[in-house]
Image (cartoon, rainbow, N blue to C red):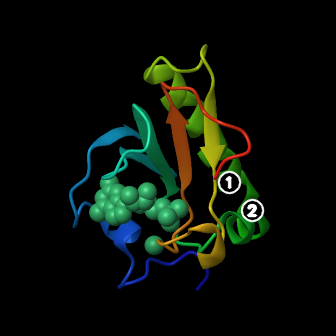
Amino acid sequence: MAGEPQEDCLFCKIVTGDIPATVVRETETTVAFRDINPQAPTHVLVVPRVHYPDAASLAAAEPAVAADVLREAAEVAAQDGVDASGFRVVFNTGAGAGQTVFHVHAHVLGGRGLQWPPG
Ligand code: 5GP
Ligand code: ZN
């Protein structure tokens, strides 16, 4: 069924606690944890508890949960104190764009100057 946990999915395992992570926020529908290889002073991943491979498929199937992910991205930025200075929310989509984990996740990046366009 759509959204069901996938046995071989790293972020499903972080959601269940089978793989440890530095969790910074949790809601009924989302988990936010620090990226293991941070690219900025704040680098947090926000994932839905349900499994979808990318942002578009989550938004199509469960738009309310997609909105929860976006709301939590802003909450993470506020909690880390990077909301006033500005932050970036990124959904890498597809291997060609650098996606390596196929459980949708918002990267929340902040705490340093962020170039535009990104590399
Ligand atoms: P993507 O490349 O798919 O957009 O982002 C995947 C992110 O997950 C990368 O930034 C990578 O550093 C992070 N990551 C990969 N494995 C782990 C892990 O086991 N724990 C945590 N916290 N982050 C991970
Ligand atoms: Zn998953």
Q: Is residue 62 left or right of residue 48?
A: right
Please report whichever mark, 1 or 2, sits nearer to the chain's N-terminal start. 2
Residue 21's disc is none
Residue sitting at 55 percent across and 69 percent down?
99
What distance separates the C-alpha of mark 1 from that of mark 2? Answer: 5 Å
Residue hosting label 2: 59
Instruction: Tell whether circle 1 marks a residue whose Cβ is less than 8 angstroms from ligand 2.
Output: no
Mark 2 residue crowding within 10 angstroms, few (<14) / some (14–19) / many (20+): some
Image height of 57 relative to 83, above or below: below
Residue hosting label 1: 66
Please indicate, yes or no, whether residue 28 appears anywhere in the rendered image. no
Front-lying residue, 27 or 43? 43
Residue sitting at 75 percent across and 57 percent down?
63
Q: Is residue 93 left or right of residue 78?
A: right
Q: Position of residue 44 (x, y in %)?
A: 44, 42
- CB contact under 8 Å: marks 1 and 2: yes
Mark 1 residue crowding within 10 angstroms, few (<14) / some (14–19) / many (20+): many
Amino acid type for the residue under numbered disc 1? Ala
Residue sitting at 36 percent across and 84 percent down?
8
Amino acid type for the residue under numbered disc 2? Ala
Front-lying residue, 47 or 90? 90
Q: Secondary structure at mark 1?
A: helix
Q: Position of residue 12 (x, y in %)?
A: 39, 69
